[in-house]
Image (cartoon, rainbow, N blue to C red):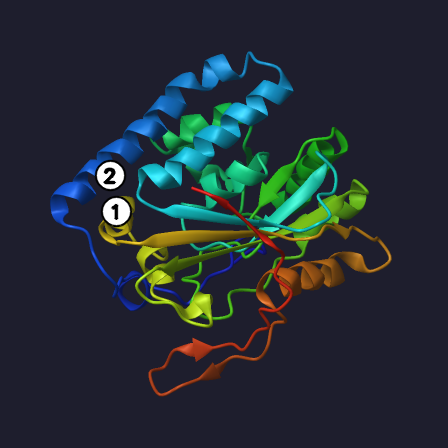
Amino acid sequence: MSGWLPAAPCTPDGCARHTGAVRAPLPAALLLLSGCALVLLGVACVPLVRLLGAGPRRRLTRRWARAVPRAFGVRVLVRHATDRGPNGGELVVANHISWLDIPLVASVLPGRMVAKREIRCWPLLGSLAALGGTLFIDRDRLRALPAAVRTIATALRSGSRVVVFPEGSTWCGRGGGGAFRPAVFQAAIDARGTVRPVRISYRASAHRTADHWSGPGAGAVAFVGADPLAASLWRVVRAAGLTAHIDVLAPIPADSEDGRRALARRARTAVLGPEEPRRTGRSGQTAVASDRANRPAESVHH
C-alpha cells in the first residue's frame, strides 16, 4: 500500500446512515433530478467557460458550485478567517467526508483539484474534472509519488490554487478523522507557498448538538468504502434539514525548516484538532478526542 492509498475504517453499513427527519420520496426525487441536471449543465458549459478570463471563470465556477449542494437540498454555511491570504498559489487542504466536499470547497476557494487517476474514467464527472484542470495522480505506485509532488509544486509556482484532501480517503465525520499524508505538503514547501486549511462538517437541523462532528448529518452525506454513488445521492436528498458547514481558516506559511511532516500536523490540527491515539469501545468502533475551538465569525450563503 502506497503513501497515496491510505484506508479509513468507515463502512457504508456502519457509518453511512441517516437517523433524523426525512423527506417524502416525491420531493426527494425532484431534488435528485434538479441536482443531477445542474451537474450535467456544468459538464456541458465547461468548454465555453474555459474561454473566459480568469476572473469571470472563477466567479461562474463559484456560483455553480454553490448551487449544486442547494440543488440537492443541502443548505450551506460559510465562515471565513479574518486573514483571507493570497488569491492564488496556495495549497488548500480539507478533511474529506463526501462527494459534496468538492463543490463546497469550489464554492469558496475554486482551484485545481488533486484526484486519483481512476476518476478520469468516471462517466461525465471524469470529463468535467479533466476540463476543470484537475491534477490526476497515480496513487497505486509509490514510485509515482515524486512526480506527483513535482506536478503540484509546478502548479503552485504558476500561481494556481491547488485543492487536496490529504486524508487520502473519505471518513464518515463522526470520529477524529485520518492523518494528513505529508507528501503533498512537500509541494507547498518546494513552491514556497502557503497552506490554507478548510474544515468541512455536516449537521442535521433536527439534531442540534454541541459537537456537530458527531451529529447524524455526517452519516447522511458520508460517502465511504464501497458505497454506491446512487445510494449516496438518494440518502442525501432523503435527509431533511441538512446544513454543510465550511470553515475557511487562516493560512499557514509553508516553512521548509519545519519539514513536510510538521506542516501536515499543523494543518491537521487546524482542521480536525490534534491527532490522538484511538481507543476501542464496546461496539468495536474507534473514538478520537479533538479540539474544536477557535472558529471564525460566520457569514451565510443560502
Specify the amino acid type for callout 1.
Val
Quarter of the picture holding the C terminus? top left
**Residue position for label 2:** 31
At x 40%, y 34%, the residue is 67
Which quadrant of the view contains residue 273? bottom right
At x 24%, y 44%, the residue is 230
* Crowd around label 2: few <14 · some 14–19 · many ≥20 (10 Å): many
| Spot occupied by residue 114 in the image (x, y as percentages of width and height) | 56, 40
The reply to whether discs 2 and 1 touch (Cβ–Cβ < 8 Å) is yes
| Spot occupied by residue 56 in the image (x, y as percentages of width and height) | 58, 19
Q: In this view, does 102 lie above or below 244?
A: above
**Residue position for label 1:** 237
SS at badge 2: helix
* Crowd around label 1: few <14 · some 14–19 · many ≥20 (10 Å): many
- The answer to whether any part of residue 278 appears in the image is yes
At x 48%, y 12%, the residue is 48
| Spot occupied by residue 101 in the image (x, y as percentages of width and height) | 46, 47
Left of 209 or right of it: where is 277?
Answer: right
| Spot occupied by residue 282 in the image (x, y as percentages of width and height) | 35, 88
Specify the amino acid type for callout 2.
Leu
Q: State which tag comes first along the sequence, 2 or 1.
A: 2
Which quadrant of the view contains residue 272? bottom right
- The answer to whether any part of residue 137 appears in the image is no
Q: Distance between the residues labelled 2 and 1?
A: 6 Å
Which quadrant of the view contains residue 285? bottom left
At x 30%, y 35%, the residue is 35
SS at badge 1: helix
Q: In this view, does 210 lie above or below 246?
A: below
Between 268 and 213, the one lying in front of the other is: 213
